[in-house]
Amino acid sequence: MKRQGFTLIELLIVITLLGILAVAVLSAINPIEQINRSRDTSTRSDAEQLINAIDRYYATKGYFPWAASAQSENTTLDWVEISAADQAFGDDAEAMLTNLSAGGTAEIKESYVNRVVSSSASLLSIYNGGDQGQSTYVCFKPRSASFREDAWKRCTEHEDYGTLPSDYPAGACPVENCTGAGDADGATACYNCLP
């Protein structure tokens, strides 16, 4: 009676072919790029939440969370990187994240604050020129190639985007490694800004 089964050589050939297919699939989907794109999407969501919280705060209080009161003339917020929950912002040195969270109007949750200032987060930068009608921009430096290309195209006023708004933060588009780069791959210093 002859036993049915695979020989050792047949098994090795099948395992080798499966390994080659696995390598081909992994190289096609580029898992590092996918992880970076996921992180950038999460950071963009955090930026949107912060802008919305600032807008709600302004609608409720009549002044920005980096100003001490409605009588404050300190409406300008220079390009600042958000790095701590109790960080002071603007000329009034207000703790903006505290004013927006449970210590103030509760527009954002403490878990949000902890997430955006954690050491593993992509740091957000914020800017507002202070003049009536100017936008508040929340920006981040993208990690993925697709978000980096998007930021580079916007900073270089690519035909897909047109000219930058007059109140766009200058810090978002530095010449070195951004607008001076010949392509998106070299544009490692461009920021992706919302709104």
Image: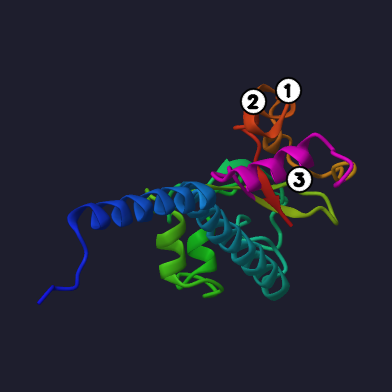
Q: Answer above or below: position of 136 versus 155.
A: below
For the point 45% across and 70% down, the residue is 103
x, y percent for residue 30: 50, 48
Q: Earlier in the sequence, mark 1 or mark 3?
A: 3
Q: Which mark is residue 129?
A: 3
| Label 2 crowd bin: few (<14), some (14–19), many (20+), radius 10 Å | some
Q: Amino acid at mark 1?
A: Gly
For the point 22% across and 64% down, the residue is 6
Residues at discs 2 and 3 in contact (Cβ within 8 Å):
no
Camera-side residue of 26 and 72: 26
- What quarter of the picture does the N terminus occupy? bottom left
Q: Earlier in the sequence, mark 2 or mark 3?
A: 3
| Label 2: element kind | helix
Range of the magenta residues?
139-161
Depth-wise, is mark 1 or mark 3 nearer the camera? 1
Cα distance between the residues tagged 2 and 3:
24 Å
| Label 1: element kind | loop
Q: Is residue 165 left or right of residue 11?
A: right
- What quarter of the picture does the C terminus occupy? bottom right
Residue indicated by mark 2: 177
Q: Amino acid at mark 3?
A: Gly
Residue 88: say if magenta: no
Residues at discs 1 and 2 in contact (Cβ within 8 Å):
yes
Residue indicated by mark 1: 180
Q: Answer above or below: position of 191 versus 10.
A: above
x, y percent for residue 187: 65, 31
Q: Amino acid at mark 2?
A: Asn
Cα distance between the residues tagged 1 and 3:
24 Å
